[in-house]
Amino acid sequence: MSLSALFSQASQNPVLSLTCALVLAVVLVNGWTDAPNAIAAAVGAGALSFRRAALLAAACNLLGALVMTAVNASVAETLYDMADFGSSPADALPALCAALCAIVVWAAAAWRFGVPTSESHALAAGLSGAALALPGGLSNLRPGPWGRILLGLAGSLLLGWLAGAACRRLAGRLRPSPALCRRGQIAGAAVMAFLHGAQDGQKFLGVFLLAASLAGGHTAGFAPEPGLTLLCAAVMALGTALGGRRIVDTVGRDMVRLGPAEGLAADLGGGLCLLFCTLAGLPVSTTHAKTAAILGAGAGGGVNRAVAGRIVRTWLWTFPGCGLLGFLLASLFRSSPFCGII
């Protein structure tokens, strides 16, 4: 579906208009609260100022979403296929709105407390919770896409930690100069932001296409269109440019004190993890991959266990918390006059 066709259809369907606005809101929040993880190590180690890093990340997010969607859109297709919202727009679109509202609320609360939550995690949880509130219940979740999501989310933690630790050991053997490490971190931050756009830009593109499908305007299968991809990428880049300083400070400074070599190792480890998973078509969390890589790279130093524990607890609560919120909001929307305006 083209961008103009989607907007034309949305102008005739108030709930689809609201759904599109909510998708864009979630994309903006993602760029604001999730993308800062890509630059946390570079800022924490002093390779880049926060403002320069945010602008670099915004540009690379945009490029990553555009390039990877054109090359391999399997991540977007997984999100598009993960749940069955039924064939009735009167049920499906309000449920999708409920899922998106749950994600925005969860992400805003995490940002308020400076905790790096995962919008990928929240997206899967919110969509699943909303789908469970529809007729069919548990049968609305599709095992194939869900298996890839769980594999990506769990695997990114282990792979990120191992890659970060391996890169730290390699840096210890090679002993690069601090100046070389800082230059490498600038490139590493750019690559991490590119891969964040490649992952998360696709996910929200999949949600856009899902909304169009549920409204009855997208029946030719999964087919991303450049204009829609550009819109998702641009809004995410705008969110990144707005900042996310609290999250950068939590991940890059409070959780682990990173020197130039550890910061470079974290960027390389996180980038390798994201690249592998993206090429494999696995939807993964940039937050999980990068935070795990930072922990792996800084494992030999002083990890602030209180901060790391707070982050892990937030991750553990995201699936049940955001899923329950999506379920409750979907149930509320279905029983309200909201459905009658479709």
Image: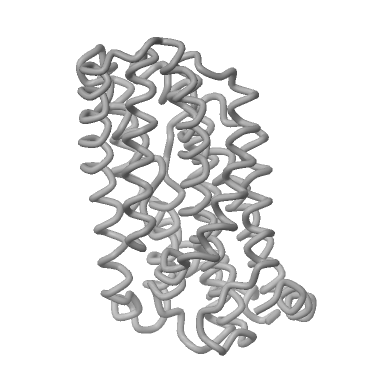
The image quadrant of residue 201 is: bottom right
Residue drawn at point x = 36 percent, y = 63 percent: 281
Q: Is residue 276 above or below residue 3?
A: above
Q: How many marks?
A: 0
In this view, the residue in front, 337 or 229, is 229
In the rendered structure, the answer to whether residue 3 lies left or right of residue 144 reads: right
In the rendered structure, the answer to whether residue 312 lies left or right of residue 337 reads: left
Pinpoint residue 113: horizontal percent, then vertical percent. Answer: 48, 28
Pinpoint residue 108: horizontal percent, then vertical percent. Answer: 55, 40
Quadrant where the image shows the C terminus: bottom right
Residue drawn at point x = 67 percent, y = 50 percent: 235
Quadrant where the image shows the N terminus: bottom right
Pinpoint residue 162: horizontal percent, then vertical percent. Answer: 20, 36
Q: How is the image coloured?
A: one colour
Residue drawn at point x = 38 percent, y = 56 percent: 278
Pinpoint residue 131: horizontal percent, then vertical percent. Answer: 41, 72
In the rendered structure, the answer to whether residue 127 lies left or right of residue 311 reads: right
Residue drawn at point x = 32 percent, y = 19 percent: 262
In this view, the residue in front, 57 or 215, is 57
In this view, the residue in front, 236 or 339, is 236
Q: Is residue 308 above or below residue 98?
A: above
